[in-house]
Amino acid sequence: MTVLSEKEFNDLVPREFKNASLAQGGMQKSSYKEILSWLKELEHMLILLGCPGCGKTFTSVACLNWLFSKKQYLDLEFVKARDLFQHLKHLYSSHLSDKDSVDRLKRCHILVLDDLGATKNSEWEGEVILDILDARWGSYAPTIISTNFTIPELGDKLDGRIVSRMLDSRNLKVENWEEDRRSI
Ligand SMILES: Nc1ncnc2c1ncn2[C@@H]1O[C@H](COP(=O)(O)OP(=O)(O)OP(=O)(O)O)[C@@H](O)[C@H]1O
Ligand SMILES: [Mg+2]
């Protein structure tokens, strides 16, 4: 197993959340315990749903920080959906294949997919996300997904096959947050 240096780890996650810690709260106490259990099991998906500013990205990076502090699982990727689509479009416009980039997200040990649904949600975007999530879902690969949608909204906004995998009963869904942290 590859051990990431602190610098490599810091380069992978947003600086804003460098010191994010699960113990800082933001979610209900029961959710905090469930997230810790999820991190210990490290299988299936952790779905963070909530309004802008409630702490989803903070929590996803806090999870990575927790894992990094244990120096266990260090093959990770953190990607915002919008950045992923822009990156793939850039590859296409340069006549390059997206295979390596997409395969990397399918196969890395831990993936954080941030802000799913915050883009156009076009058919093409849906196909990219389904391709990645289906591969990860099928191999129980630990995947943290954040979205501004509520569970009922997911069904309206995203492809049913994506939603079905996100709402798999084995996944942990966290919906209860204290408030918009940006306005504190
Ligand atoms: N538990 C917490 N303790 C302290 N600060 C927090 C906590 N959770 C979030 N924050 C801070 O609140 C702000 C909003 O958090 P964050 O960016 O994670 O929200 P978000 O749910 O991802 O929002 P968006 O949907 O807009 O991406 C950030 O500046 C973050 O550092
Ligand atoms: Mg966010």
Image (tube, rainbow, N blue to C red):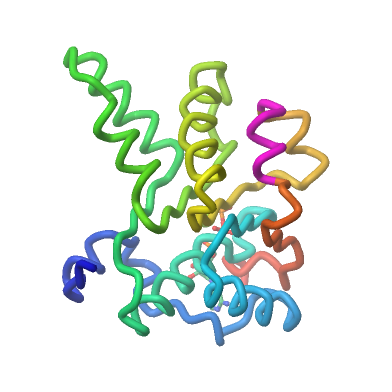
The image shows residue 146 at horizontal and vertical percentages of 57, 52
**Residue most toward the front?**
139
- Residue 83, placed above or below residue 79: above
The image shows residue 158 at horizontal and vertical percentages of 67, 29
Q: Is residue 31 left or right of residue 116?
A: right
- Which residues lie in the magenta part? 159-166
Q: Quadrant of the C terminus?
A: bottom right
Residue closer to the observer: 158 or 3: 3
Q: Is residue 106 left or right of residue 144?
A: left
User: How many numbered markers are drawn?
Assistant: 0
Q: Is residue 166 left or right of residue 182?
A: right
Q: Is residue 28 left or right of residue 8?
A: right
Please tell me whether residue 104 belongs to the stretch shown in magenta: no
Residue closer to the observer: 180 or 171: 171
Q: Residue at x 37, y 36 (%)?
A: 84
Residue closer to the observer: 42 or 153: 42
